[in-house]
Image (cartoon, rainbow, N blue to C red):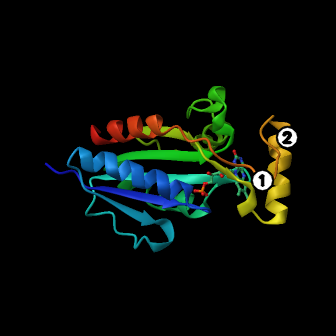
Amino acid sequence: MNTKTALIYATVDGHTLKICERLKEVLLQHDQPAEIIHIEAFDGDLSSYDRIVLGASIRYGVHDKNIVELINTRQQELESKKTAFFSVNLVARKPEKSSPETNPYVVKFFKKISWRPDIAETFAGMLDYPRYSFFDRTMIRLIMWMTKGPTDPTTVKEYTNWDKVDAFGKRLASL
Ligand SMILES: Cc1cc2nc3c(=O)[nH]c(=O)nc-3n(C[C@H](O)[C@H](O)[C@H](O)COP(=O)(O)O)c2cc1C
């Protein structure tokens, strides 16, 4: 049976989409079709999917509100399917904060909702100072200074561990 997966994502700068694209590739390697859907383009119909993956990045401490709303309004339907959740943030670049059990944003997220996906993961994201507005760059530099990360405003660095993304994709394929 070809399990069909919906990868529904929210992004600000496109990194969560890049992770969805990689997950789709892994699923295709397992002969499992997947559709990538931006949360704002999602028409609300989950009926044609057996598996739902929700992915969102962190911006100033929170996941996209539309993803949270989807979970809260469609929890029963989500519970009737195989489900997964992943979070993308920069705190996850620290090994001790890189799992769903230790990443503060994911821990807080699951304290606020009662939905529990079959699997969850946390990925370190992308730092791209030149891309940010002056305000965002200043704020992120401050956060990075506090957490001993790079503060050089020309820094562009991808922290994502793609082997970890591939491993998550394989777990998805066997859900
Ligand atoms: C304005 C802004 C605020 C952010 N706030 C946080 C934050 O509070 N904590 C964190 O760990 N990462 C934070 N990040 C890092 C993002 O989560 C990271 O860049 C991620 O790769 C973004 O993914 P996206 O392109 O899919 O939105 C922030 C990034 C930006 C641009």
Number of numbered discs visible in the structure rendering: 2
- Could you say which is closer to the camera, residue 152 or residue 49? 152
Disc on the earlier residue, 2 or 1: 2
Q: Position of residue 63 (x, y in %)?
A: 62, 54
In the figure, is residue 75 to the left or right of 24? Answer: right
In space, the residues marked 2 and 1 are separated at their CA atoms by 15 Å
- Mark 2 CB lies closer than 8 A to ligand 1: no
**Residue type highlighted by circle 2:** Trp
Can see residue 65?
Answer: yes
Q: Residue at x 33, y 63 (%)?
A: 46
Q: Position of residue 16 (x, y in %)?
A: 53, 54
Which residue matches tag 2?
145
Q: Residue at x 63, y 37 (%)?
A: 92
In the picture, the disc for residue 154 is 1
Q: Position of residue 40 (x, y in %)?
A: 50, 71
Disc 2 secondary structure class: helix
Can see residue 113?
Answer: no
Q: Residue at x 78, y 66 (%)?
A: 133
